[in-house]
Image (tube, rainbow, N blue to C red):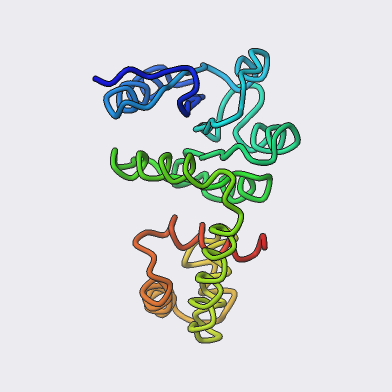
Amino acid sequence: MASRGASDPIVYVIDDDESARHSLEFLLDVAEIRVRSFASADAFLKSAPPLSGACVVTDVRMPGTNGVELAGKLKERDDTVPVIVITGHADVPLAIQAMKAGAADFIEKPFDDEAILAAIRKALNESTDDEQKQNERREVLDRLALLSTRERQVVDGLVDGKANKVIAFDLDISPRTVEVYRANAMMKMQAKTLSDLVRMVTIARLG
């Protein structure tokens, strides 16, 4: 394994779930990425580790300071540090809040090892590349322009954390029709998962 110096990029993993924390630590170590973990956001903030060249991976729900609050506090301290939020399906609305607070991305559990590694590497590479972020946002806006009015209404409902049945009631259509619009929208947006779709639209809204 190649040696890693203090100047190499580092990932701070913050999760109160010990097994999840150690699992991600091991994954990053094997991938030869420097990693340091914390059992809570409060412990991380108290330690105040250097943020230059770093990436933060944090769970959303934790005792004390949660992932949303942490993203906001880090945004105040260092505008360039990327924060990736790990979220359960029921926590997607919270993940959206985190992105509004400054988080760069969110990954929904259970996540694939390669997916989380790709997100981390992307965050480390693009932490200061504003031009690349703007290019990504333009691509998302171009894809959004392809959606029909109904598809956009369904997408907006999904991004707001609403269930298909609620969106169906709001739009006075059947849940099955919502599913069709949702599938069409995901295809046009080139989104593999609902999390991808939500992330894209959130990026567009934050611009």
Q: Could you say where residue 141 lies in the image, as x and y percent from the top left? A: 56, 74
Percent across and percent down for residue 30 are: 27, 24
**Residue at image point 60% right, 34% down:** 67
Which residue lies at the image location 34% right of the left edge and 41% below the top edge?
Answer: 111
Q: Residue furthest left?
A: 1
**Residue sticking out furthest to the bottom:** 148
Q: Is residue 195 left or right of residue 53?
A: left
Residue 47, percent from left and from top: 64, 13
The residue under the point 38% across, 19% down is 4
Front residue of 57 and 147: 57
Picture mark count: 0
Task: Classify residue 116 as left or right of residue 206.
Answer: left
Check the image and name the residue furthest to the right: 76
Q: Is residue 113 above or below residue 184?
A: above
Q: Is residue 26 above or below residue 141?
A: above
Q: Is residue 71 above or below residue 11?
A: below
Foreground: 32 or 24? 32
**Quarter of the image where the C terminus is located:** bottom right
Q: Nearer the viewer, residue 166 or 24?
A: 24
Give left or right: position of 172 versus 30.
right
Give the quadrant of residue 204. bottom right
Q: Quadrant of the N terminus?
A: top left
Please state the horizontal and vertical placement of residue 136, each as a whole percent of the image: 52, 63
